[in-house]
Amino acid sequence: MIAFGMNGGPLPREHGFPVRMVVPGLYGFVSACKWISRMTLTTYDAEQAYWTERDWATDAPIKISSRVDTPKPLSDSPVGRTFIGGVAWARGVGIDKVEVRIDGGPWQQATLGPDANNDYWRQWYLEWDADAGQHFVACRATNKDGEVQTAARMSPFPEGSSGIREIAVNVG
């Protein structure tokens, strides 16, 4: 795709104005190109891309992943009934379930937002009776093929990050 706008307006300069290339389902270092000045049709055998010359992966599909968006890490939350919520994604397959773990306890199934035939991401939430103190909240996703988000931590280099994300929240 050639993107010329973002969030209902023109593409900002820092995001590639006037246009940038985006290939859905691949990490940006594989597919995205800002400030396009020319395009060349080629193959991986004939040419190396800018990032692969710097030892990033040639092909890097987006991995199953999830994140906690609320509460924010290290935020102060009141004692009592609240919500934990976030987003999960699984390229081309879709999300079947999201589970949340609080303070290393058992995984609890979260409620998913509407699917709307979206094969990439889903919002999710879990009601939580929060006690005073610092708590650690983690989430993991399972795609519609039954594949569970890996717990193996990996940095973004060379083929995209992975692992279970956990945040600390202060209650009280």
Image: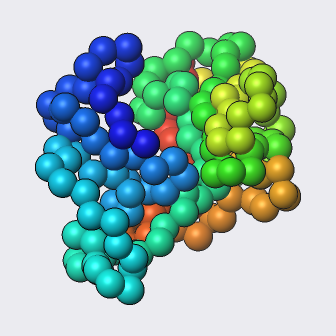
Q: Which of 53 and 172 is in front in this view?
A: 53
22 horizontally vs 169: left or right: left
Q: Nearer the viewer, residue 143 or 92?
A: 92
User: Is residue 20 in sight in this rendering?
Assistant: yes
* Residue under the image location 77 percent in, 32 percent down: 117
User: Is residue 135 in sight in this rendering?
Assistant: no
Q: Which of 1 and 26 is in front in this view?
A: 1
* Residue under the image location 35 percent in, 24 percent down: 6
Q: In which quarter of the image is the N terminus?
A: top left
71 horizontally vs 98: left or right: left
Quadrant of residue 149 in the image?
bottom right
122 horizontally vs 116: left or right: left
* Residue under the image location 66 percent in, 64 percent down: 150
Residue 96 appears at what percent x and percent y? Answer: 82, 44
Residue 109 appears at what percent x and percent y? Answer: 83, 38
Residue 39 appears at what percent x and percent y? Answer: 25, 57
Residue 101 appears at what percent x and percent y? Answer: 71, 44
Q: Is residue 133 above or below residue 46?
A: above
Quadrant of residue 146 in the image?
bottom right
* Residue under the image location 63 percent in, 64 percent down: 151
Quadrant of residue 30 in the image?
bottom left
| Count of number-bearing discs | 0
Q: Is residue 30 above or below residue 102?
A: below
